[in-house]
Image (cartoon, rainbow, N blue to C red):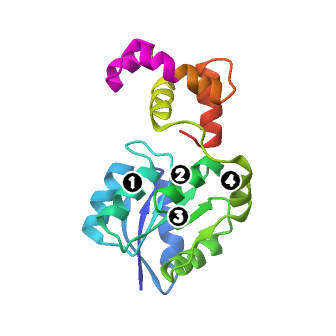
């Protein structure tokens, strides 16, 4: 029996996935979580073979949660199942130790098959997304530029960002300027949009 943990913030989607997987004779959903933070706690309690994670959730994203689960439970395989098939997300997920990346509009029967393949030691990646990730190239933003740009996403001032990230205002301006240049944007709002569209944040 393959023990699966579902991590998805939308209760209806999570319930549908649990029902779908519950029909499989060799798959058992042993836990559910609604946020990245909750995911690690439930994973430690249930010790699943496979964890199925959404990316964009309140309370910690799925890629970060997946990396934490892999560190705490090295035998657990991490699968990303997301609405957002962005090349940057795929790269970040693979770097964080995920072994599968599927988009939610894939046929339902493929999910159970992918779980079995992952448990057998295979990698499962949406082919179209893999091709897009290769052609898109690596994330041009440094980790600090990503932090500053992500902090700017809600319209925070340079002063607010500096305070939150414990940086000087001048340093924040330099990182923003560099991020704007690397994303070929006209301003930081456009830089945030472009970076989000690529999955770089």
Identify the residue under disc 1.
65
Disc 3 designates what residue?
Answer: 16
Chain-order first, disc 1 or disc 3: 3
Tell me which residue sits at (43%, 63%) in the image.
Answer: 6
Mark 3 or mark 2, which is nearer to you? 2
Along the viewing direction, whichever of 81 and 89 lies nearer the viewer: 89
Q: Relative to residue 26, is residue 46 depicted above or below?
A: above
Describe the element under mark 1 as helix, strand or loop: helix
Single out the mark in the foreground, 1 or 2: 2
Cα distance in 3D space between marks 3 and 4: 29 Å
| First in residue order: circle 1 vs circle 2 | 1
* Residue 74 within the segment the image draws in magenta: no
**For the magenta stretch, what is the residue range?**
158-175
The alpha-carbon separation of the residues under discs 1 and 2 comes to: 12 Å
Mark nearer the viewer, 4 or 1: 4
Q: Residue at coordinates 37% horizontally, 43% vertically from top-left?
A: 59
Position of 18 relative to 145 (above/below): below
Q: Is residue 76 above or below residue 166?
A: below
Cα gap from disc 3 to disc 2, whole angstroms: 27 Å
Q: Which residue is mark 2?
A: 92
User: Which x, y percent locates residue 189?
Assistant: 60, 21
Instruction: Tell me the tag on residue 133.
Output: 4
Left or right of residue 79: residue 191 = right
Q: CA distance from mark 2 to mark 4?
A: 10 Å
């Amino acid at each position: 029996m393959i023990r699966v943990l579902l991590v998805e913030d939308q209760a209806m989607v999570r319930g549908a996935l649990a029902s779908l997987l519950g029909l499989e004779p060799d798959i058992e959903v042993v836990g559910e979580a609604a946020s990245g933070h909750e995911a690690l706690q439930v994973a430690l309690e249930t010790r699943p073979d496979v964890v199925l994670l959404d990316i964009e959730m309140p309370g910690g994203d799925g890629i970060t949660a997946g990396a934490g689960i892999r560190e705490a439970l090295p035998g657990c395989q991490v699968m990303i199942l997301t609405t957002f098939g962005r090349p940057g997300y795929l790269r970040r997920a693979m770097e964080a130790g995920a072994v599968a990346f599927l988009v939610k509009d894939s046929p339902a029967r493929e999910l159970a098959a992918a779980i079995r393949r992952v448990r057998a030691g295979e990698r499962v990646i949406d082919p179209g997304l893999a091709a897009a990730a290769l052609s898109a190239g690596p994330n041009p933003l440094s980790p600090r530029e990503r932090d500053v740009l992500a902090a700017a996403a809600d319209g925070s001032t340079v002063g607010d960002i500096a305070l939150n990230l414990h940086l000087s205002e001048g340093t924040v301006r330099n990182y923003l300027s560099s991020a704007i240049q690397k994303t070929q944007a006209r301003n930081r709002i456009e830089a945030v949009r472009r970076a989000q569209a690529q999955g770089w944040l």
